[in-house]
Amino acid sequence: MRFTDINLFGVYVAPISVLMVAAWLVLLPLRRLADRFGLLHAVWHPSLFVFAIYMILLASMVMFFGWWRA
């Protein structure tokens, strides 16, 4: 598994930063769905729950892209 820097408009950025933004963009509709169906009202600490889901998404994306590019 090898992650190399990504050239975004002439600026080299770490691949984890791109994956962090992608995970956040995936999290936004999931958070709206959870709020619409009342899931965020059923958990003890909603912001910790959303952060945990974000971490799960980010780790899954890192593992998937690490496996896919190997």
Image (cartoon, rainbow, N blue to C red):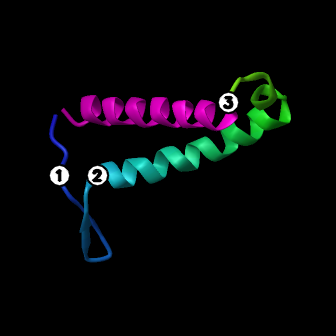
For residue 34, side relative to residue 5 (left or right): right
Residue ID at (69%, 43%): 29
| Quarter of the figure that contains the C terminus | top left
For label 1, the SS is loop
Magenta region: 46-70
Rounded to the nearest angstrom, the CA distance separating label 1 from label 2 is 7 Å
CB atoms at circles 2 and 3 under 8 Å apart?
no
For label 2, the SS is helix
Q: Magenta part mainly helix, strand or loop?
A: helix
Nearer the camera: disc 2 or disc 3: 3
Residue ID at (65%, 46%): 28
Nearer the camera: disc 1 or disc 3: 3
Front one among 8 and 49: 49
Q: Is residue 4 above or below residue 61?
A: below
Q: Which residue is mark 1?
A: 4
Residue ID at (42%, 48%): 20
Amino acid at circle 3: His
Q: Which residue is mark 2?
A: 15
Residue ID at (33%, 36%): 62
Q: Earlier in the sequence, mark 1 or mark 3?
A: 1
Rounded to the nearest angstrom, the CA distance separating label 2 from label 3 is 30 Å
For residue 17, side relative to residue 67 (left or right): right
For label 3, the SS is loop
Q: Which residue is mark 3?
A: 45
> Percent x, y for residue 37?
84, 29
User: How crowded is the residue under tag 1: few (<14 C-alpha within 10 Å), some, or many (20+)?
Assistant: few
Count of marks placed on residues? 3
Rounded to the nearest angstrom, the CA distance separating label 1 from label 3 is 37 Å
